[in-house]
Amino acid sequence: MPVRHQLSYDVGMDLDLRLVRSFTVVADELHFGRAAARLFVAQPALSRQIRRLETSLGVELLDRTTRRVELTAAGSSFLVQARRLLAAGERAQAAAQQDAASRITVGFSAGLTITAAVSAFRADYPNAEIRMKRLEWFEQHDAVRDGGVDVSIGRLPIDDTDVAVRPIYEEPRVVMLPAGHRFAGKESLSILDLADEPIARHEGAVAWDAFWRVDPRPDGRPAPDGPIVESVEEKLEHVASGDCIAILPASAADRYIRSDVCGILIHDIAPAIVAITTRREHHPPMLLAFIDALSRPPPPNSARRRQPYSLLRNP
């Protein structure tokens, strides 16, 4: 881990702590063979490390002969600072690890709220820091896999075997139409009623696009192509402009209320599945507690029904 360190003779450089640590072991042993054994490296490799450190410092740290190894005056001076530098590095690492262990970053998708989970979690972990990040549909698994968030709550399908997915509840899907559409005001629709309506597309995600466009339709016909979109806001702008229709989960439709669009339940397609996504690794107890809180289905905040995934799948 390179660390900027200013030596007493005012030469600034980037020091590799691995080389600094190797030097302190050689200084302790005053013998390259014994030092190499302690460091579990070959003696020639250790000699090259010390040469690299000396080159970066611009001074000789050790006086080597065939019979002995001794510290030079510069080496003795540097050794004092080297030990302080390594101790500071260890303290910095410990502080960073402690900070990371007390922080959870959670991602969430459009229409989903995590307020209840955060409140329940903070009852047991009042000092934990919770960071929240709004994720688009195409970010929810990448953010987890790449470490941008520790856990995310979003919707299926997620076509990524590198992450663990836990379904928690289901919700209906709703078609978004322009306010002046001929079906506006209907209580519900069949997907076959929308057979000729262009529908918003999602680029680069075959499974996601097929599910959220119901493509192909139950009668085998392909869904008519509408514009490519990335976000709910883009979908609704195109819908309001009359460019296409779009299918949203009920919770997102409830939260994006506009006077120029309307949402109507589609009664004959599978519901959307809300799921938690995490990395496939051992989780610390604090993160497990948050995942448990996040796994509890929220109470309905509208007339649309939400039920635990297990209840709907296992009546």
Image (spheres, grey):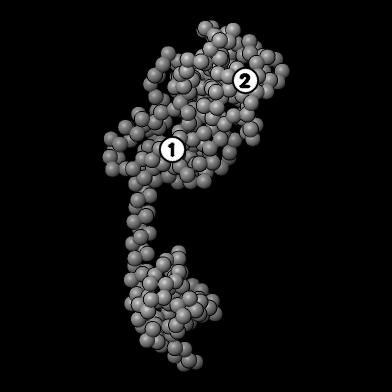
Residue 11, given in percent of the width and then of the height, sits at 41, 75
Q: In which quarter of the image is residue 286?
A: top left
Residue 243: mark in rendering: 2
Residue 127 position (above or below residue 54)? above
The answer for how far apart the CA atoms under marks 2 and 1 are is 30 Å
Dot 2 falls on a residue whose secondary structure is loop
Q: Mark 1 points at which residue?
A: 133
Comparing 262 with 266, the one in front is 262
Which badge, 2 or 1, comes first in the chain's sequence? Answer: 1
Residue depicted at x 48% and y 40%: 278
Classify mark 1: residues with Cα within 10 Å, few (<14), some (14-19) or many (20+).
some
Q: Which amino acid does label 2 sit on?
A: Asp
Residue 257, given in percent of the width and then of the height, sits at 46, 18
Comparing 235 with 207, the one in front is 235
Q: In which quarter of the image is residue 88?
A: bottom left
Residue 116 position (above or below residue 60)? above
